[in-house]
C-alpha cells in the first residue's frame, strides 16, 4: 500500500511522527506472529527530523478554508453526533461540525451531576440487589444506534450495549435520558448491536420493533461452573430484544464469536462478522484460520421456528433458543443461518445506504469483503450452493481496515487502523475489478488521520438518507494533537469533508476517552422536550403548600418542592436510625431552570429539571444539623436556597 505523494502534501502532518506510529503498531502485531504479512505491505515513509510543532495553517493545509466549517457564536450546528463512551459506560452528544460537547448521558455508570445511580428512579433502571444497592456500577458502551422508520431515523430512541455485563440500554431521544436497561441471559461480551429497520413479514410495520445483539465471548452454557475448561462445549448466543418492552424475545445458538452487527433495509436479514470461528481461547488460537465468517440470520425463519416451538432453554432462562449452528443448518432452504467465509479476523460490518451490500472490513487482511444482499437471499432460497458465492468484491484497501461509512454517490470510506488513514473506494469499481476488469480501480483517495482510527461514520450514512457531506474519524490516539494533560490523552475525532473528489480534513475535536461508535444525525430529526409534564410523576408534590413530613414507624417520607430561590420546607426533623425518603418536585416551569439537591455526609446529590420529580432514600445514623442545599446555580439567591435537616440523637 503506497500513499500518493500529492495527497500526502494536503494534510498537515509530521512525517517523522507518522513513521514512529506505524512502526510501533506493526511491531506490536509482529509480536503476535503476523510480521510476514504486514511487513510486506509496510508503506514507505520519508525519514527525517521532527518538524516544528507549529506550521502556517493555510499553507500546510493546502488552502482548506477552515472558517467554512466554523459555527459562529449564536449559530447552531447542523448535526447531532451521538457517541459511545467506551469504558466510561456513558453516551455523549456533540454538535457537528463544531465538535461542541453538549451533554453526557449516564447509562451504565454513576453520575454525580444528575444523580444517576443515586436517585431511586435511576437505580431501578440500572438494577438493584435485594438490599437496594446497585447490581453493577460499571459499563462499557461501544455501539449506539437509533430506531428507524422507513429506512431512516425516527428520533425516538437510541440503543447502546454494555460489553462488560451483557446489558442493552435504551435512551429516549426527547429527553435524552436512559429509560430502560436489560441484562441479556447467558451472554458475555455483548458487543455488536443494531435495530431492525422494518418487519420481515408485515409490510405495514416499517419501523424498528427488534434490536439484535451479538455476543463475543463464548462460555459454557449455562455458565455455572460445569465444563469450565472444555472450550469445545462453549458457545455464543445471538439475542433479539423487543424494542418496546426491552425484553429478550429469542436467542440463536451460533458457531464462533460475534463482533459487530448490521441489519438489512428490508427487515429480512441481520448479520454479524466473526473473528474467532476457531473457537480459540488464546489469541494465537483465534488467528489460526485463513478465513472467518460473516454470519447471516433469516429473521422470518427464526421467528417461525420459535413460534413452532423448535426451541430449547438454557439454565433458568425463559428465553427460547433456536439452533443456528452450521451442523443444524446444512440445507439452505430451511436454514436459519448462513455463514459466509471472509478473510481472517474481520472487524466491522456495515450496510450500503441503498441496502444492496454488506461491507465486512478485513482487520488482519488488507481487504474489504462486499457481500450482496440479494445473493444471500438466493442462498437461503436454495439457488446458490456455496455461501462464498454471495461475495461480489474484495478490494485491497490498506492495512488494518476496521469500519466503513458510505456517501450517497456509491463510495465507501473505511478506517485503516495500521495505516492510520481513511481510504475512499468505489463500490461499482470494486465489483468490476473482482469480475476481472483490469481497468477498474476501486481506491479513489486516501487521507492521513491522527492517529490510528477505530470507527468512522458518515453523516446520515447508516440510513437511506446518507448525504455524503462529512466523515468523522474516531481515532484511538491523539499524541501531540492537543495540549498535554498527563498520561491519559484525549482521543481525537477528526472531521473530514467528503463532498468533493478529494477528502479534506477540516477539524480536530478532542473527545473524552474512549468513543467507539458515533452516529451523525441531521438536527431536524431530533425533537426534544425542554420541560417535563408534572403529571408524568405520580409522586409529584404539585403545590408548595402540600410539602410535608410523613412518618410510618422508622420510615419517614419528606414531600418537598423547589421553586427558585427556596425549597418548600425550610427545615424538617428526623431521628437517628430512620430510613428517610425525600421526594423532590421542581415546580419551576421556566426552561433551563434546574435545581440541585445535596445533603452533606449522606452521599446525596442529584438535580431536578423543570416540572420533574425525583426521590432518594437513605439512613440517618449521624445526629446533627445538615444543610441541604441547591447545587445548580438557579437564581441570585441560589446560595441562600437551603433547608436544614435536623437529626435527633
Ligand atoms: S468496536 Cu471499537 S473501534 Cu466495539 Cu465497534 Cu471497532
Ligand atoms: Cu436552586 Cu440553586
Ligand atoms: Ca480467526
Image (tube, grey):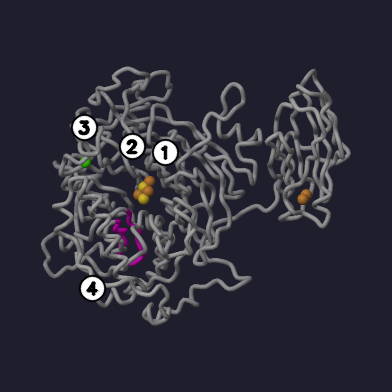
> Label 4 to label 1, Cα distance in Å?
39 Å
* Left/right of residue 624 with respect to residue 462 in the rendered view: right
Judge depth for marks 2 and 4 and give the one in front.
Answer: 4
- Sequence order check: which comes first, mark 3 or mark 2? 2
Q: Is mark 1 within 8 Å of ligand 1?
A: yes
Residue 311 coordinates in the image, percent (x, y) = 34, 23
At x 46% / y 64%, what residue is drawn?
Answer: 482
Pick the front one: 256 or 134: 134
Q: Name the quadrant containing residue 272.
A: top left
* SS type, badge 4: loop
Mark 4 lies on residue: 4
Residue at 68 percent of width and 42 percent of height: 606
Q: Residue at x 46, y 56 (%)?
A: 490
Q: Which residues are magenta?
A: 403-417
Which residue bears the numbered disc 1? 163
- Queried on whether the Cβ of the residue with tag 2 lies below 8 angstroms from ligand 1, the answer reads no
Q: Nearer the viewer, mark 3 or mark 1?
A: 1
- Contact, mark 1 vs mark 2 (Cβ under 8 Å): yes
Q: Which residue is mark 3?
A: 326
Distance Cα–Cα, label 2 vs label 4: 38 Å
Task: Please tell me which of labels 3 and 4 falls first in the chain.
Answer: 4
**Magenta stretch prevailing secondary structure:** strand
Q: CA distance from mark 3 to mark 1?
A: 26 Å
Q: Earlier in the sequence, mark 4 or mark 1?
A: 4
Amino acid at each position: 500500500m503506497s500513499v500518493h505523494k500529492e495527497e500526502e502534501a494536503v494534510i498537515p502532518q509530521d512525517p517523522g511522527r507518522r513513521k514512529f506510529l506505524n512502526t510501533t503498531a506493526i511491531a506490536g502485531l509482529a509480536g503476535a506472529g503476523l510480521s510476514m504479512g504486514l511487513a510486506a505491505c509496510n508503506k514507505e515513509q520519508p525519514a527525517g527530523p521532527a518538524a516544528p510543532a507549529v506550521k502556517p495553517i493555510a499553507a500546510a493545509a493546502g488552502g482548506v478554508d477552515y472558517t467554512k466549517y466554523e459555527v459562529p457564536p449564536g449559530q447552531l450546528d447542523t448535526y447531532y453526533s451521538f457517541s459511545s463512551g467506551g469504558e466510561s459506560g456513558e453516551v455523549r452528544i456533540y454538535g457537528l461540525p463544531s465538535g461542541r460537547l453538549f451533554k453526557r448521558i449516564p447509562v451504565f455508570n454513576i453520575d454525580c451531576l444528575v444523580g444517576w445511580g443515586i436517585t431511586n428512579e435511576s437505580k431501578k433502571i440500572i438494577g438493584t440487589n435485594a438490599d437496594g444497592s446497585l447490581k453493577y456500577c460499571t459499563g462499557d458502551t461501544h455501539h449506539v444506534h437509533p430506531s428507524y422508520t422507513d429506512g431512516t431515523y425516527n428520533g425516538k430512541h437510541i440503543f447502546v450495549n454494555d460489553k462488560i455485563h451483557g446489558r442493552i440500554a435504551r435512551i429516549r431521544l426527547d429527553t435524552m435520558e436512559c429509560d430502560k436497561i436489560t441484562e441479556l441471559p447467558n451472554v458475555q461480551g455483548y458487543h455488536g448491536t443494531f435495530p431492525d429497520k422494518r418487519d420481515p413479514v408485515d409490510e405495514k410495520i416499517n419501523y424498528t420493533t427488534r434490536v439484535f445483539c451479538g455476543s463475543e465471548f463464548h462460555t459454557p452454557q449455562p455458565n455455572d461452573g460445569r465444563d469450565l475448561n472444555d472450550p469445545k462445549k462453549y458457545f455464543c448466543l445471538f439475542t433479539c430484544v423487543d424494542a418496546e418492552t426491552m425484553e429478550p424475545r429469542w436467542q440463536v445458538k451460533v458457531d464462533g464469536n460475534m463482533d459487530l452487527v448490521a441489519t438489512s433495509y428490508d427487515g429480512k436479514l441481520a448479520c454479524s462478522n466473526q473473528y474467532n470461528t476457531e473457537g480459540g481461547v488464546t489469541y494465537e488460537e483465534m488467528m489460526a484460520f485463513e478465513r472467518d465468517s460473516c454470519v447471516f440470520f433469516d429473521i422470518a425463519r427464526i421467528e417461525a421456528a420459535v413460534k413452532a416451538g423448535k426451541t430449547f432453554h438454557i439454565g433458568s432462562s425463559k428465553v427460547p433458543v433456536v439452533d443456528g449452528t452450521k451442523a443444524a443448518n446444512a440445507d439452505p432452504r430451511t436454514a436459519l443461518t448462513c455463514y459466509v467465509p471472509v478473510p481472517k479476523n474481520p472487524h466491522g460490518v456495515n450496510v450500503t445506504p441503498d441496502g444492496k451490500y454488506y461491507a465486512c472490513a478485513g482487520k488482519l487482511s488488507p481487504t474489504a469483503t462486499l457481500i450482496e444482499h440479494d445473493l444471500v437471499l438466493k442462498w437461503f432460497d436454495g439457488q446458490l450452493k456455496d455461501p462464498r458465492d454471495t461475495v461480489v468484491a474484495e478490494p485491497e484497501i490498506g492495512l488494518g481496515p476496521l469500519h466503513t461509512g458510505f456517501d450517497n454517490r456509491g463510495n465507501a470510506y473505511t478506517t485503516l487502523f495500521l495505516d492510520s488513514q481513511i481510504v475512499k473506494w468505489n463500490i461499482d469499481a470494486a465489483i468490476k475489478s473482482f469480475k476481472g476488469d483490469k481497468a477498474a480501480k476501486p481506491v479513489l483517495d486516501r487521507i492521513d488521520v491522527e492517529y490510528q482510527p477505530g470507527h468512522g461514520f458518515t453523516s446520515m450514512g447508516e440510513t437511506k438518507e446518507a448525504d455524503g457531506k462529512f466523515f468523522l474519524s474516531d481515532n484511538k490516539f491523539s499524541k501531540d494533537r492537543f495540549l498535554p494533560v498527563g498520561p491519559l490523552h484525549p482521543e481525537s475525532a477528526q472531521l473530514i469533508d467528503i463532498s468533493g473528489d478529494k477528502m479534506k480534513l477540516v477539524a480536530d475535536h478532542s473527545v473524552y476517552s474512549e468513543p467507539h461508535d458515533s452516529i451523525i444525525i441531521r438536527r431536524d430529526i431530533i425533537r426534544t422536550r425542554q420541560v417535563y409534564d408534572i403529571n408524568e410523576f405520580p409522586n409529584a408534590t404539585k403545590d408548595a403548600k402540600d410539602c410535608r413530613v410523613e412518618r410510618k414507624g422508622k420510615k419517614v417520607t419528606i414531600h418537598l418542592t423547589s421553586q427558585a430561590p427556596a425549597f418548600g420546607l425550610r427545615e424538617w426533623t428526623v431521628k437517628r436510625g430512620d430510613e428517610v425518603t425525600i421526594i423532590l418536585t421542581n415546580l419551576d416551569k421556566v426552561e433551563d431552570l434546574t435545581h440541585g439537591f445535596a445533603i452533606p455526609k449522606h452521599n446525596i446529590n442529584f438535580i431536578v429539571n423543570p416540572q420533574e420529580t425525583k426521590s432518594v432514600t437513605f439512613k440517618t445514623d449521624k445526629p446533627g444539623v445538615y444543610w441541604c442545599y441547591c447545587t445548580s446555580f438557579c437564581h441570585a439567591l441560589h446560595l441562600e436556597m437551603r433547608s436544614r435537616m435536623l437529626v435527633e440523637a
